Structure formats: C-alpha cells, structure tokens
Image: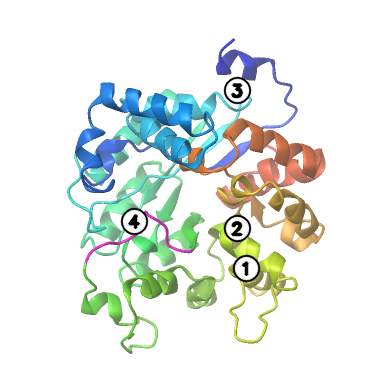
C-alpha cells in the first residue's frame, strides 16, 4: 500500500496547514553546496542509488545520520518541485495544505545554480496552479538583489501569499532594501516567515564584505567572524526594531529558536541565563510573545520537533500558556527534516497524539489561518 492510499484512509476532522516545507531541487542549490568531490559524483543517479543502498546497510537502515543525509540528497534530485511536493503530501491527510518556501541560494558563496530564483518561483507558481487548494507559495526575498522590492511585490500582487527570508545566507534582516517590503506586508496583511535558528550548512560561505559588517540599525561596524556574524543575523533580538516599527506586521520566527536552544532551555533552568551563559533563543521568543508587545509575532515548530523525541513534551508544557499557544504554527521543514532523527509521518502523528486534538487543531489549523490572514471558519 503506498503513502497516498494510507493517507486516504487516515481519519481527519480538521484541515492541517503545514506552514513550513520546501520543494526546491538540486537545480536550485549551488554546484558546490555539497563539498567537492561529492558534488560532482552525486549528479550521477546510478552512483547515488548505489551509495545510498550501501550507507543504509551499514548505517542502521534509514535511521543513521549518514543515511538520513543521503535521504535528503535523494529527495533533492527529484526531477521537479511537483515530485518533491507529491512526496511530502503522501505523509499527511489528503486535504492538508502546505506553505511552500523557496530558497534563493545563488548568493551564498558556494558556486552557481542551474536554475535561477526566478525560475524556481515560476515552477512553484505552476505547482500552485496544479494544486490551488493545497499549495500556498511564499516568495523568497534577498536584499542583495537590487530589484528585490519590485520583484517581490510583483510576485505578491500575482498571488504569492507571503515573504520568505533566510538571513544566514548572508544579509541582515534590517537591511534597508527590506524595509519597504516590511511596510508593504504590514499594510496589505502579508505574512513574513524568517529562519530563526543558529546557522547550519545552509549558510553564507563567501568572504565578509563591508556591507555585511556594517550594522544597519546602529550604523557601527561589527568586528566578528563569519559564524558569529551570521548568528547575529538570525538572533530573535535582531527582529525587535522591525516589530516595533511595524506593529501590524505578521512575522514568524521559524524553528522556535532551534533544537540546540531547546536543549539549552532544558539544561539551563527553564532558559534563564546563568552566570556566563547566553539566554536560549527559545526563552527569548517566549519572552517576546509573552510580553504582548508584538501582536503579530508567531513562531513555528519546524525541524525542531523532529530533532529529539523529548521536545514534544516540553512543547505541550509551553502550550499550556494560552498566549504562547495562540502564536505557534505547525510545520515540519520537509524535506530538510529527512535528516532528522524521526521521519515526517512518525513525528507528525506523535505531535498530534501528545498534544491532543484541541491543541493540535490550534497550531495546525486555527493559528495558520490567522497567520495567513484567512477567515477563522472559511
């Protein structure tokens, strides 16, 4: 029995919205994204198949770390975004909707891309046309592109539903070219989703430039290395000036701070900064939401809930605070989550089971509709 048939039989009394998946393929990643010499070898399909089979045999089947990374590579080499989407869809009830987030990786300093971000957007729009009730496309924006405002507004006016940012690719979220987009989004009720966990492999690899080192808020230069600078770009505190300037803006800090900061939160006495340690990003986001200063602030649980089985129990405790519960979105980070310890269907079902139907309905149906600016009961 295939995944689609299983999903058809799965009982569903609600419409889930997975607020965070990806459908980009290897054509949208730079040619040095995978370190040499693997980047060239992996382009040969027959070699990928053999390598993946060997790795699974000697790395605990599908569950070992290397095998999971191999699974990501195999998904990325699907022929189209539609093929990737169909794979994600098969893990969920058939009426599930998906916020699809493109990635503009051409400027990350890891080589050239086979298909531009414009082509990626165009293919995503075609995918939306094939699944108009299920695909919710966001537009990737990078302020280093001189036409970012015009191009992004064109996509939004055409029917894209939100803006996707990924500052670790090499830009500050307070970059002056993004401010007109924040203003436009706030005025027109367009949601913005931004990466908010510490930098990973999908990060800027080129040399630091004067523009990167100059802080757009203070006007002063930073004396930081690459990892520290990219971490600064992603820190929840970096978004405070944006939220204060645009109180109507609906902004999602994706990943709820990230798995590493959930671990810090658990180990550091509920996230309070102990002597000589930094406050976890999970604690920062909780404080920002609890303060009630930022009415449009949201977060999502993508990837983080797949990283450790224990985190879902902490999530349930956090959601006992109604203010927090009203600002958390369900998301998985497919297909990047294929590299996590727990697979897509297993984790999604477990989250739903542990939280219970009432809380799951809130984060998977009600909150996403509010974040997207939709009627509560369409």
What distance separates the C-alpha of mark 2 from that of mark 1?
A: 8 Å
What distance separates the C-alpha of mark 4 from that of mark 3?
A: 30 Å
Q: Residue at x 75, y 56 (%)?
A: 314
**Residue 94 shows which numbered tag?**
3
Q: Mark 2 or 1 closer to N-term?
A: 1
Q: Nearer the viewer, residue 39 or 236?
A: 39
Q: Mark 3 or 2 closer to N-term?
A: 3
Specify the segment rendered in magenta: 198-206
Q: Which residue is mark 1?
A: 285
**Residue 35 shows which numbered tag?**
none
Q: Mark 4 or 2 closer to N-term?
A: 4
Task: Verify whether residue 199 appears in magenta.
Answer: yes
What distance separates the C-alpha of mark 3 from that of mark 2?
A: 25 Å
Q: Nearer the viewer, residue 280 or 212?
A: 280
Q: Mark 4 or 3 closer to N-term?
A: 3
Secondary structure under badge 3? loop
Q: Quadrant of the N terminus?
A: top right
In the depicted structure, whether residue 74 falls above or below residue 29: above
């Amino acid at each position: 029995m295939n995944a689609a048939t299983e999903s058809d039989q799965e009982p569903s009394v609600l419409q889930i919205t997975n607020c965070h998946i990806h459908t980009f393929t290897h054509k949208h990643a730079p040619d040095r994204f995978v370190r040499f010499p693997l980047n060239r070898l992996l382009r040969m399909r027959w070699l990928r198949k053999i390598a993946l089979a060997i790795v699974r045999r000697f790395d605990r089947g599908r569950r070992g770390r290397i095998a999971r990374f191999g699974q990501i590579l195999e998904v990325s080499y699907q022929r189209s975004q539609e093929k990737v989407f169909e794979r994600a869809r098969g893990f969920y009830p058939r009426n599930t909707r998906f916020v699809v987030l493109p990635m503009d990786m051409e400027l990350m300093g890891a080589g050239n891309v086979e298909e531009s971000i414009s082509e990626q957007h165009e293919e995503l729009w075609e995918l939306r046309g094939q699944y108009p009730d299920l695909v919710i496309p966001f537009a990737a924006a990078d302020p280093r592109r001189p036409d970012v405002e015009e191009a992004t507004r064109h996509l939004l006016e055409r029917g894209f539903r939100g803006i996707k940012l990924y500052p670790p690719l090499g830009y500050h979220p307070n970059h002056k070219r993004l401010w007109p987009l924040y203003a436009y989004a706030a005025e027109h009720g367009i949601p913005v989703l931004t990466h908010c966990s510490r930098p990973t492999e999908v990060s800027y690899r080129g040399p630091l430039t004067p523009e990167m080192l100059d802080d757009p808020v203070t006007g002063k230069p930073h004396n930081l290395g690459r990892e520290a600078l990219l971490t600064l770009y992603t820190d929840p505190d970096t978004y405070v000036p944006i939220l204060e300037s645009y109180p109507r803006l609906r902004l999602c800090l994706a990943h709820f701070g990230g798995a590493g900061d959930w671990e810090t939160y658990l180990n550091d006495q509920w996230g309070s900064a102990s002597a000589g340690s930094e406050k976890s990003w999970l604690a920062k986001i909780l404080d920002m939401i609890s303060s009630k200063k930022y009415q449009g602030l949201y977060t999502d649980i993508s990837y983080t809930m797949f990283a450790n089985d224990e985190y879902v129990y902490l999530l349930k405790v956090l959601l006992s605070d109604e203010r927090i519960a009203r600002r958390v979105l369900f998301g998985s980070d497919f297909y990047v989550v294929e590299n996590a310890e727990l697979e897509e269907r297993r984790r999604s079902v477990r989250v739903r089971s542990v939280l219970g139907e009432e809380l799951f309905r809130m984060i998977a149906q009600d909150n996403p509709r509010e974040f997207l600016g939709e009627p509560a009961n369409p």
